Image (cartoon, rainbow, N blue to C red):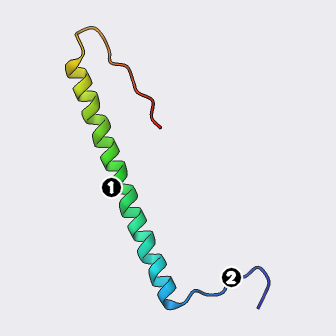
Amino acid sequence: MKKGVAPMPSRAEAKNEATSRAARQLIDSETAARLAKTNRLRAARLAQEAPEGVEPQKQKQG
């Protein structure tokens, strides 16, 4: 075997990797959608609660 070349994954390993990759993509997209919705709803709530003429403070993301 050549040095620095990884062996080919078995058929089961390749299928597991493809499934894991698809699941991660789905989870990441759902997380992004959930965070966007949360931020949108938070901004709407703060805008509704804030007295007129005063802008709500932005929260740090992290």
Instruction: Name the residue type under label 2.
Output: Ala
Q: Which mark is residue 17?
A: none
Q: Residue at x 45, y 35 (%)?
A: 61
Question: Height in image: 7 above or below 36?
Answer: below
At mark 2, the secondary structure is: loop
Q: Residue furthest left?
A: 48
Q: Position of residue 22 (x, y in %)?
A: 40, 70
Instruction: Name the residue type under label 1.
Output: Glu
Q: Circle 2 is placed at which residue position?
A: 6
At mark 1, the secondary structure is: helix
Question: Height in image: 49 above or below 40?
Answer: above
Query: Disc 2, disc 1: CB below 8 Å?
Result: no
- Badge 1 crowding class, 10 Å Cα cut-off, few under 14, some 14 to 19, many 20 or more, is few
> In the figure, is residue 20 to the left or right of 55?
right
Q: Earlier in the sequence, mark 2 or mark 1?
A: 2
> In the figure, is residue 47 to the left or right of 24?
left
Question: Image quadrant of residue 52?
Answer: top left
Q: Residue at x 33, y 55 (%)?
A: 30
Question: Image quadrant of residue 4?
Answer: bottom right
Distance CA(mark 2)–CA(mark 1): 33 Å
Q: Position of residue 11 (x, y in %)?
A: 50, 90
Q: Which mark is residue 30?
A: 1
Q: Residue furthest top?
A: 53
- Badge 2 crowding class, 10 Å Cα cut-off, few under 14, some 14 to 19, many 20 or more, is few
Count of number-bearing discs? 2
Q: Position of residue 23 (x, y in %)?
A: 38, 68
